[in-house]
C-alpha cells in the first residue's frame, strides 16, 4: 500500500511553505530517513525525509509551488526497488492530486483559481480582495502568494486603486533576473511592516572598549580552559543589555492592540548571517545565563545558520535583539526593529580615536552603538538612559557584579 508523504507541521504560526527543491525524483529508490524534498518557510528551510525505504511516486507539487501544512507532496511504494530513470514516471505528474485548497468563507469574492495560491485565496477572501487588485504575484507563473497579500495589506494605499499600471521593465541583456527566495521576500515584507506600524526612532552613543578589552585579555586563557569557548564581546554586551533592560522594562515590552505587555524575563535575539540572509535566533531566558552559556549558545546559532539547520522554534519569541554590523566593518548604522519587539541594539566596529579624558587627549578603542526603539511605548528619556547605562556597564564590567 502506498504511503502518503505530506507537508509536516512547520512550527508556531507557520501554515504554508514553498517547495524549494526536489532532492529525489519519481521512480527513484530512497532509503529510510533519506531527504526527498526541501521546503522553504518564512523563516528557515526544512527537509522532508522518507518514512521508510521504497520508491517514490509522482510529485503532487512542483518546485516553486506554495503548499499548506498537511498537503500531499508525493507517495512512497514501500519495498519497491525503484529506478534510476525518473523520466518514466514523469507523465504521471499531471495526474497527481493537488493540495486541497482552503475552504473560502461564504462571503468570499470571486477569485480566479489560477491567479492565487490556496493560502493567498483564503486571506484575500477574509479581507475582501481579489486577484485583479493585487496584479501579478511573485509565485510560480505569476500566481499570488500569501506573502503578496500580506505585503499589499501592509501598504497604506492598499485600499486605493492604482493610478496606472506599472509599465513592463526592459531588461538589459547584461542583467540577470533572479526570483527572490521566500526568506528574502519575508525579510523585505517584515522590514516594511516595521516601518509602517512602529514610530521608530534611533539614538546613539559611543563606548570606550578599553575596560572590556582588558577583561578579555586578563581572563581569556582561563575562560577557554574551563568552558572550551572564547570570551567574546557579544556575551559582555548581552549581559550589559540584560541589566539595562531590567532597569528600563519598556524597551523589553511590546504593544498588543491597546495593551502593553511587560516581561520579567529576557529572550535575547542575536542577528546572524546565513547563506539565505539575516536571521535572528533567540537565546531564551538569557537573563538566567552566564557569559559561558551565552557564548556557547551564540556559537551554536552561528554554526547552524551557516549550515541551514536552525530550527523554527529557535527563531521566535524574542523580546529584544542585538545586531553587530561591526563584524562587516560598519562604523555607524540605524538598525530596524524586529517587530513586534520595541527595541534593537546595533553594535559597530571598534576604532582607535582621539578622545578627551581628564582634560587630556588620548587614543582609545571606541565603538558607536545605536538603539532603535518604538516611540509609541518608549520615551526618548528612557531610550537615552538605557544607552547611558549600557555604556557604563560595558566600560566598567564590574558594575554588573554589584548594585550601583
Image (spheres, rainbow, N blue to C red):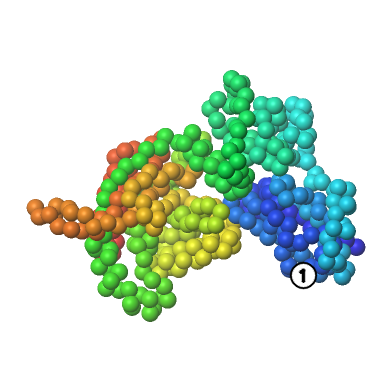
Pick the residue in front: 294 or 58: 58
Q: Quadrant of residue 231?
A: bottom left
Determine whether, in the image, residue 256 is placed left or right of residue 104: left
Quarter holding the N terminus is bottom right
| Residue 227 in the image, given as x and y percentages of width and height | 41, 75
Residue found at the far front of this picture: 173
In the rendered image, the vertical position of residue 74 relative to residue 297, given as above or below: above
Which residue is identified by label 1? 32
Kindly state the secondary structure of the residue where label 1 is placed: loop
In the rendered image, the vertical position of residue 343 relative to residue 122, given as above or below: below
| Residue 169 in the image, given as x and y percentages of width and height | 60, 32
Which residue is pictured at 23% across the width and 62% down the height?
210
Which residue is pictured at 73% across the width and 54% down the height?
7
| Residue 25 in the image, given as x and y percentages of width and height | 79, 60
The answer to whether residue 241 of the structure is visible from this angle is no
Quarter holding the C terminus is bottom left
Pick the residue in front: 128 or 160: 160
Q: How many marks?
A: 1
Determine whether, in the image, residue 83 is placed left or right of residue 270: right
Residue found at the far bottom of this picture: 225
| Residue 84 in the image, given as x and y percentages of width and height | 83, 66
Which residue is pictured at 67% across the width and 36% down the height?
137
Amino acid at each position: 500500500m502506498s504511503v502518503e508523504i505530506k507537508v509536516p507541521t512547520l512550527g508556531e504560526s507557520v501554515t504554508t511553505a514553498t517547495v524549494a527543491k526536489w532532492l529525489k525524483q519519481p521512480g527513484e529508490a530512497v532509503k529510510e530517513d533519506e531527504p526527498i524534498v526541501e521546503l522553504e518557510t518564512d523563516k528557515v528551510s526544512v527537509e522532508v525525509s522518507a518514512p521508510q525505504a521504497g520508491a517514490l511516486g509522482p510529485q503532487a507539487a512542483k518546485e516553486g509551488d506554495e503548499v499548506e501544512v498537511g498537503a500531499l507532496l508525493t507517495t512512497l511504494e514501500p519495498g519497491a526497488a525503484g529506478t534510476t530513470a525518473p523520466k518514466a514516471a514523469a507523465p504521471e505528474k499531471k495526474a497527481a492530486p493537488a493540495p486541497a485548497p482552503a475552504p473560502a468563507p461564504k462571503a468570499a469574492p470571486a477569485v480566479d483559481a489560477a491567479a492565487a495560491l490556496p493560502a493567498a485565496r483564503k486571506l484575500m477572501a477574509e479581507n475582501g480582495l481579489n486577484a485583479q487588485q493585487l496584479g501579478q504575484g511573485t509565485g510560480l507563473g505569476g500566481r499570488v502568494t500569501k506573502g503578496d497579500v500580506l505585503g499589499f495589506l501592509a501598504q497604506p494605499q492598499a485600499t486605493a486603486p492604482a493610478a496606472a499600471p506599472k509599465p513592463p521593465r526592459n531588461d538589459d541583456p547584461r542583467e540577470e533576473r533572479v526570483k527572490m527566495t521566500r526568506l528574502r521576500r519575508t525579510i523585505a515584507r517584515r522590514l516594511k511592516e516595521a516601518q509602517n506600524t512602529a514610530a521608530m526612532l534611533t539614538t546613539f552613543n559611543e563606548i570606550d572598549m578599553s575596560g572590556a578589552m582588558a577583561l578579555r585579555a586578563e581572563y581569556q586563557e582561563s575562560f577557554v580552559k574551563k568552558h572550551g569557548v572564547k570570551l567574546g564581546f557579544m556575551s559582555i554586551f548581552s549581559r550589559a543589555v540584560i541589566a539595562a533592560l531590567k532597569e528600563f522594562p519598556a524597551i523589553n515590552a511590546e504593544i498588543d492592540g491597546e495593551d502593553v505587555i511587560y516581561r520579567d524575563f529576557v529572550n535575547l535575539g542575536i542577528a546572524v548571517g546565513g547563506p539565505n540572509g539575516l536571521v535572528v535566533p533567540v537565546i531564551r531566558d538569557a537573563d538566567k545565563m552566564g557569559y559561558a552559556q551565552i557564548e556557547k549558545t551564540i556559537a551554536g546559532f552561528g554554526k547552524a545558520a551557516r549550515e541551514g539547520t536552525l530550527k523554527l522554534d529557535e527563531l521566535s519569541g524574542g523580546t529584544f535583539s542585538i545586531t553587530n554590523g561591526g563584524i562587516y566593518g560598519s562604523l555607524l548604522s540605524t538598525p530596524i526593529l524586529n517587530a513586534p519587539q520595541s527595541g534593537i541594539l546595533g553594535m559597530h566596529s571598534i576604532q582607535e580615536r582621539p578622545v578627551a579624558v581628564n582634560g587630556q587627549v588620548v587614543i582609545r578603542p571606541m565603538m558607536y552603538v545605536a538603539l532603535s526603539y518604538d516611540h509609541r511605548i518608549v520615551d526618548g528619556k528612557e531610550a537615552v538612559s538605557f544607552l547611558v547605562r549600557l555604556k557604563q556597564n560595558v566600560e566598567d564590567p564590574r558594575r554588573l557584579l554589584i548594585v550601583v
